[in-house]
Each structure stands twice: as structure tokens, then as C-alpha cells.
Image (spheres, helix red, strand yellow):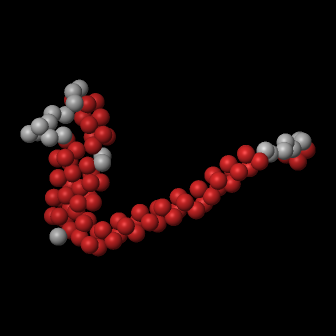
Amino acid sequence: MTTRSDAPEQPRSERTSALSMLATFVVAAVVPGASVLVIALVVRAVAAGWGPLLGGAALAATWPLVARAWQEIEGRPPRRLWRLPGWVWLGVAGTLLCLLLFA
């Protein structure tokens, strides 16, 4: 059985080391920092009364999945109601549902 230490080590170039350090910094510092910032902004928006609108926007963001599922089930894309796209109606329905549930 051979171990990793038995193999000869390849020297790393300076560019590879710099890219590795940059990737480590992005994963360790920037991603969690941005996540905390987004969570703080969402909490502040909900506390300010924007919760139903955020809920409607979150529901409207699922429109590509809903449209794809509709296409698979019905065999045709969803129809437009009053010439507005479906994500608008999904967002309005989500906002009204959030207003009803949380008001």
C-alpha cells in the first residue's frame, strides 16, 4: 500500500497558489457575508411591512417551473389571461394569499 507522502510532490506555480487563495477567500468570506446581508435586508423588509410583496415575488419566481410542468401535463404552454404573463398572476395571487394569511 502506498501513501500520498510516497509520491513525489509537484511544486505549485505562483498563479495557481494565488487562484487557490482567492477561491478560498470568496468561499470563506464573501459568500457568507453576502448571505448575512441578504437575510438582514429581507428581515428588515418584512418588519417594514413588505412581507406580502416579498412572498408574491418569491411565488412569481417559480413561474418557469410552473410553466414547464403545465407544458408537460397539458401538452401546450399556459394561456395568457388579459394578455398578461403568468408570472404576474402568480405574483398577484401570492401577494394576496400572504396578505390574507398574515394580516
Q: Is residue 61 above or below residue 49?
A: above
Residue drawn where x is 22% and y is 63% of the image: 52
Please state if 99 lies on the left or on the right of 41 as rendered: left
Task: Identify the residue at the far top of this view.
Answer: 75
Figure label count? 0
Residue drawn where x is 28% and y is 30% of the image: 72
Asked if residue 96 shows in the view, the reply is: yes
| Residue 31 image point, x, y percent | 53, 58
Task: Identify the residue at the far left of this view.
Answer: 82
Q: Between residue 12 and residue 74, name the one nearer to us.
A: 12
| Residue 7 image point, x, y percent | 88, 41
| Residue 63 image point, x, y percent | 27, 43
Residue drawn where x is 60% and y is 60% of the image: 28
Q: Quadrant of residue 56?
A: bottom left
Please state if 7 lies on the left or on the right of 21 as rendered: right
Q: Between residue 71 and residue 87, name the one nearer to us.
A: 87
Q: Quadrant of residue 38?
A: bottom left
Q: Quadrant of residue 96?
A: bottom left
Residue drawn where x is 26% and y is 49% of the image: 60
Q: Is residue 100 above or below residue 85?
A: below
Please state if 64 lies on the left or on the right of 5 as rendered: left
